[in-house]
Image: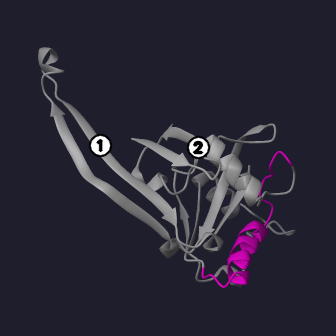
Amino acid sequence: MTRTRQGDTGQTGSTSCGSLASLPLIADASARHQEHQRHPHRLHGANGAALTNHDPLVDAVGTLRDNNESPTAAIFSPRTGRALAKLKDTTNQPLSVPSYLDGVPRYETNQVPNNLTQGSSSLASDVFVGDWRQLYVGVRTQLQITVLGERYADTGQVGILAGFRGDVAVARPKAFHVTSGVL
């Protein structure tokens, strides 16, 4: 599946994605750069940073609440989830999740990459916190599936071509927060 996103500058980029679930999360490089120029929520350091506490999640949830929004979930990569689970206090005990994050489910998905560029690092990831009810997925055409029997007839195989046209729109931009540069 190929996804195209047009940014505010009129530039269009295209990237391949594995599923419809990743469409709202990952923007192509130029659109991602443009978005972060408008809303820079980076971890300390130009090259990103490893998580040392839950502060980035608390700050993301707090930013939404400051804007009168109610976060419904945080989404991040399994590597980020593992890093959060490994956090320890000064006595080497697991760091408990602050009660401020109660009621905000946290989901891991491999649709959030761990190979984004942040400064000189190419191992960065993002954390998405938002009121996901404010993200609309529009369907322009139904899923179309075509069997390509002739193409593979000489080998006894069948090919399948699937196509879908849709778009994603954010109803209220302040209902979302992206923290980038998570190593």
Q: Residue at left 51%, top 73%?
A: 134
Q: Position of residue 11 (x, y in %)?
A: 60, 42
Give residue 28's quadrant in the image: top right
Left or right of 105: which side holds 32? right
How far apart are labels 2 and 1 at the CA level? 20 Å
Judging by the rendered image, the residue that carries numbered circle 1 is: 163
The structure residue drawn at horizontal position 51% and vertical position 39%, both measured from the top left corner, is 15
What element does badge 2 sit on? loop
Say few, some or many: other residues with alpha carbon within 10 Å of mark 1 (under 14 / 14 to 19 / 20 or more). few
- The magenta stretch is 46-70
- Check disc 2: other Cα within 10 Å, few if <14, some if 14-19, many if 20+: some
Residue 114 in sight in this render? no
Q: Residue 91, position in %: x, y?
A: 85, 69
Q: Name which residue type carries label 2.
A: Asp
Residue 182 in sight from this viewpoint = yes
Q: What type is the residue that disc 1 sits on?
A: Gly
**Residue 28: image tag:** 2
Q: Nearer the viewer, residue 104 or 95?
A: 104
**Where is residue 171 shown, x and y percent of the image?**
53, 71
26 relative to 121, above or below = below
SS at mark 1 in the image: strand
Looking at the image, the residue that sits furthest to the front is 10
Magenta stretch: includes residue 178: no
Please, which residue is most extreme toward the top here?
A: 154
The picture quadrant where one finds residue 174 is bottom right
Looking at the image, is mark 2 or mark 1 earlier in the sequence?
A: 2
